[in-house]
Structures are given as C-alpha cells and as structure tokens.
Image (cartoon, rainbow, N blue to C red):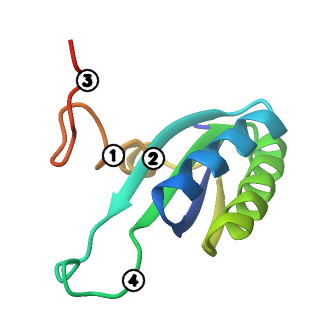
C-alpha cells in the first residue's frame, strides 16, 4: 500500500513550478508529476493553462505540502482545487504518476546542445 498522494490544481505553468517548490520546501515529499491540461478549444478559449502538481509522501507531510503549495499557487495566479488521497491503491498511484509534460510528451521543446 502506498503512503499518500496530494494533487494541487492551478492556473499557469509559473504557478505550478512555484507550488511544487513550496511543497518540496514545506515537508518531506517527492514531486512525482507536473501535468498540464490543454482544453480542446485552447486556441480560442480565454482561460490560462490548467496545471496540476502531484506529490507523494507520508500523509501528514503530504497534507502540509499541499497546503503550502495551494497557498503559493493562489498567490501567483489562482488555485482551482487541492486534494489528498491517503493510502491510494496501486491503480490510483499509476494514474497519479502519469504526466502530460515532459521530454517525450507533445509540446516538449528539447534543450539546445
């Protein structure tokens, strides 16, 4: 059985990085994924990119980290929601670790060199 997973959803990439940093500094947790959600009508929609930061650790640490991340996100561009899943199932962990942002994902810009 797994410890806990925390999910913080917010507007914008800068908020996601700020929230992940706050979570990692607030408690002994691991940032396991940063996700983006680009709506189908993103080119015409007047809303910013929705991001999710996912963290893992002991329940009390994840709770503290989620609160810190939510506060950081709210101060940058706005919090959508936050949630802690204590002892997630293996299937839930598998889904939590899925990412849409990364080296081998659509939209990634490779580093120069």
Give the residue at mark 1. Answer: 99
Q: Mark 3 to mark 4: distance in Å?
A: 28 Å
> Alpha-carbon neighbours of circle 4 within 10 Å: few (<14), some, or many (≥20)?
few
**Marks 3/2: CA–CA distance:** 18 Å
Mark drawn on residue 34: 2
Q: Earlier in the sequence, mark 2 or mark 4?
A: 2
Q: Considering the numbered disc 1 on the image, is that residue within a helix, a strand or a loop?
A: loop
Front tag of 2 and 4 = 4
Depth check, mark 3 against mark 2: the one in front is 3
Pointer 3 or 4: first along the chain: 4
Q: Is residue 80 left or right of residue 32?
A: right
Q: Earlier in the sequence, mark 3 or mark 1?
A: 1
Which sits earlier in the primary sequence, circle 1 or circle 4? 4
Q: Quadrant of the C terminus?
A: top left
Q: Which residue is mark 3?
A: 111
Say which mark, if any, is on residue 47. Answer: 4
Give the residue at the far front of this rendering: 112
Q: Do the CB atoms of the residues marked 2 and 1 lie less than 8 Å apart?
A: yes
- Given residues 17 and 112, the one toward you in this image is 112
Question: Vertical placement of 92 versus 57: above or below?
Answer: below
């Amino acid at each position: 059985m797994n410890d806990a997973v925390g999910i913080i959803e917010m507007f914008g990439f800068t908020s996601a990085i700020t929230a992940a940093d706050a979570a990692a500094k607030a408690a002994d947790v691991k940032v396991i994924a940063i996700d983006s959600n680009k709506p189908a009508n993103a080119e015409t929609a007047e809303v910013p990119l929705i991001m999710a930061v996912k963290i893992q650790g002991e329940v009390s640490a994840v709770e503290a980290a989620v609160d810190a991340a939510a506060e950081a996100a709210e101060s940058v561009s706005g919090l959508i929601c936050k949630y802690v899943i204590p002892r997630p199932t293996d299937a839930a962990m598998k889904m939590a670790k899925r990412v849409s942002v990364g080296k081998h994902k659509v939209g990634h810009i490779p580093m120069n060199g």
